[in-house]
Image (cartoon, helix red, strand yellow):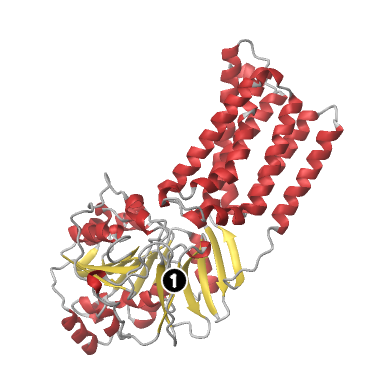
């Protein structure tokens, strides 16, 4: 099409319908990732399910639409778009319950999200598939080839607009419900426009009714009791859904995509709510002299529990590489984070930050992993070697890994241990729960060749004043795991999703500090209630009165709790 033809182009009603169907179908596909992720994670299997369902539904719609194209009319496209908008209202209102119902289906972990995606997004995508063949049939272009090429081009341009606008504009600024409402109203408006200038009573009435349905669905939402507590703040960031929630025990928790990431006791802000954050201090027993530690880097901020603790306890400079600026802002507003001379937050990916800086660190803490969502580029050998290069001669690296210490669910931990051990001279690991369930495992590596024993670390704990008693943590050390059946994670081969697949459905045990100990209910799936390998009894942690909390099928508790 020449520039003169382009300037004189006036879209027909079928052209508008094709463009809008492209916008909404691709916009819904991007949005599906945000809706599905809190329940099933955002692994390659989740995105594979989304892409598969959308392509299959569109293909079926194209096929059926082509078979019925001889009956195509603007009026038929009107009803198709209204039907799609009505289903979008169902998605907006009922996605939570539909996700819960779908998650109860007994399917292998890698296929678990498929029914949910199919139920929520299969029908509206199938309906939108009818639009393109109908528009080709109604096209004013000469010949089948020109008509089909014209329709493909408009639909693809619409898809580009839908993907770009949803990713870069809508998700960072609007809630999921508001985005669904917007797409629904766009469909209703287009359907209404297709009936003009002759205003047909039935389509007009249906348009008004469905528009009201969308508004009600987005405005009210399902009335449910949030068992987590009082929602203090919530927003959609460019990367995730962020919530700050206070429970009945005056513990404030940061949730990202419905997964807990940090917690703070409002009555005692310096207390370690999550037991595993105490382990961040173990490297202070492994350096030559803790008084000479000057620079510490945390990759992953969350509620900034670890960084704040290091700034408070030691005379050190703390840098934090946190990718999501909204997370850092929430930490400042709700978790008492204060940047200053000794605390600097960098809005940057951790690997990029390390690559660009010429600064060396005495300690690097990697606290960016999640149970279901692990940034693969931070697991690979290249990253571990980069971290090793950025450490001082006696520097220490610590990675907070989410997995089981042995048996089913341990594959990712063992592969990560093997990868870290390849990059560093010496490697150690510590469990944070006495059970053999999925938990936070702290993998600690030293740049220098070391051979620390529990006795030596216990002696250093007694002798050194590091502001925290780590005697119980030292006693939870693990033997070197078996790694002959897992790969070193490299840029060419890092099958993190498949290594984590065995953890899905398993009980996730989180130790919390407190005055009472309560054992979690055994998980219905996995090895959470099993004794340790070899038939031994569960390890008894030396610290008195930890509170154990298990996380199984609860959709708000399927993720990790990095601090």
Q: Mark 1 points at which residue?
A: 550
Residue at image position (20%, 81%) is 457
Which residue is at the far top?
A: 143
From this view, report whether residue 10 is shown above or below residue 104.
above
Relative placement, left or right, of 309 versus 392 is right
Q: Is residue 469 visible?
A: yes
Relative placement, left or right, of 371 versus 32 is left
Under circle 1, the secondary element is strand
Label 1, residues with CA under 10 Å away: few <14, some 14-19, many ≥20 = many
From this view, report whether residue 486 is shown above or below residue 396.
above
Residue at image position (63%, 28%) is 130
Relative placement, left or right, of 139 versus 351 is right
Q: Where is residue 419 in the image (x, y as percent from the top left)?
A: 23, 57
Residue at image position (60%, 30%) is 129
Quadrant into which the N terminus falls: top right
Q: Position of residue 399 (x, y in %)?
A: 30, 65
Which of the pair 221/506 is nearer the observer?
A: 506
Hey, which quadrant is residue 80 in on the image? Answer: top right
Q: Can residue 181 be seen in this view?
A: no
Which of the pair 289/17 is nearer the observer?
A: 17
Hey, which quadrant is residue 563 in on the image? Answer: bottom left
Residue at image position (48%, 82%) is 269
From this view, report whether residue 323 is shown above or below residue 282.
above
């Amino acid at each position: 099409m020449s520039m003169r033809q382009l300037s004189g182009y006036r879209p027909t009603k079928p052209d508008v319908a094709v463009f809008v169907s492209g916008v909404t179908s691709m916009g819904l596909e991007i949005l599906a990732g945000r809706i599905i992720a809190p329940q099933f994670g955002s692994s390659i299997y989740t995105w594979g399910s989304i892409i598969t369902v959308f392509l299959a539904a569109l293909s079926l719609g194209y096929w059926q639409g082509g078979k019925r194209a001889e009956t195509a009319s603007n009026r038929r496209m009107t009803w198709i778009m209204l039907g799609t908008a009505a289903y979008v209202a169902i998605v907006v209102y009922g996605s939570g319950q539909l996700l819960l119902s779908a998650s109860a289906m007994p399917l292998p972990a890698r296929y678990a999200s498929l029914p949910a995606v199919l139920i929520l997004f299969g029908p509206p995508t199938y309906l939108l598939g009818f639009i393109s063949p109908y528009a080709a049939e109604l096209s004013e272009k000469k010949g089948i080839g020109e008509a089909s090429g014209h329709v493909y081009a408009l639909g693809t341009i619409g898809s580009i607009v839908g993907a770009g606008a949803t990713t870069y504009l809508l998700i960072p600024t609007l809630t999921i419900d508001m985005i669904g409402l917007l797409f629904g109203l766009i469909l209703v408006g287009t359907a209404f426009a297709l009936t003009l200038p002759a205003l047909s009573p039935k389509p007009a009435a249906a348009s008004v009714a469905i528009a009201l349905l969308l508004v009600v669905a987005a405005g009210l939402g399902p009335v449910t009791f949030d068992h987590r507590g009082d929602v203090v703040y919530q927003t959609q960031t460019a990367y995730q859904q962020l919530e700050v929630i206070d429970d009945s025990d005056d513990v404030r928790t940061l949730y990202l995509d419905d997964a807990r990431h940090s917690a703070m006791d409002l009555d005692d802000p310096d207390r370690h709510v999550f037991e595993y954050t105490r382990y961040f201090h173990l490297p202070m027993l492994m350096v030559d002299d803790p008084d000479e530690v000057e620079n510490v880097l945390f990759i992953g901020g969350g509620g900034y529990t670890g960084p704040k603790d290091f700034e408070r306890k030691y005379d050190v400079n703390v840098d934090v590489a946190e990718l999501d600026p909204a997370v850092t802002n929430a930490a400042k507003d709700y978790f008492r984070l204060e940047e200053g001379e000794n605390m600097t937050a960098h809005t940057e990916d951790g690997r990029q930050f390390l690559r660009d800086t010429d600064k060396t660190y005495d300690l690097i803490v990697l606290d960016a992993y999640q149970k279901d969502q692990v940034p693969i580029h931070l697991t690979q050998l290249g990253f571990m070697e980069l971290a090793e290069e950025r450490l001082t001669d006696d520097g220490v690296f610590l990675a907070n890994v989410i997995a089981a210490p042995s048996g089913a669910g341990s594959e990712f931990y063992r592969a990560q241990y093997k990868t870290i051990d390849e990059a560093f001279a010496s490697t150690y690991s510590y469990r944070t729960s006495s059970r053999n369930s999925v938990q936070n495992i702290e993998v600690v590596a030293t740049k220098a060749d070391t051979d620390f024993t529990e006795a030596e670390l216990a002696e250093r704990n007694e002798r050194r004043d590091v502001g925290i008693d780590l005697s119980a943590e030292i006693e939870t050390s693990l033997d070197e795991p078996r790694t002959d059946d897992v790969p070193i994670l490299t840029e060419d081969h890092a099958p993190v999703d498949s290594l984590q697949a065995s953890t899905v459905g398993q009980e996730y045990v989180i130790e919390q500090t407190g005055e009472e100990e309560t054992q979690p209910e055994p998980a219905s799936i996995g090895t959470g209630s099993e004794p340790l390998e070899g038939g031994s009894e569960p390890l008894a942690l030396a610290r008195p009165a930890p509170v154990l909390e298990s996380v199984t099928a609860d959709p708000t508790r399927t993720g990790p709790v990095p601090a």
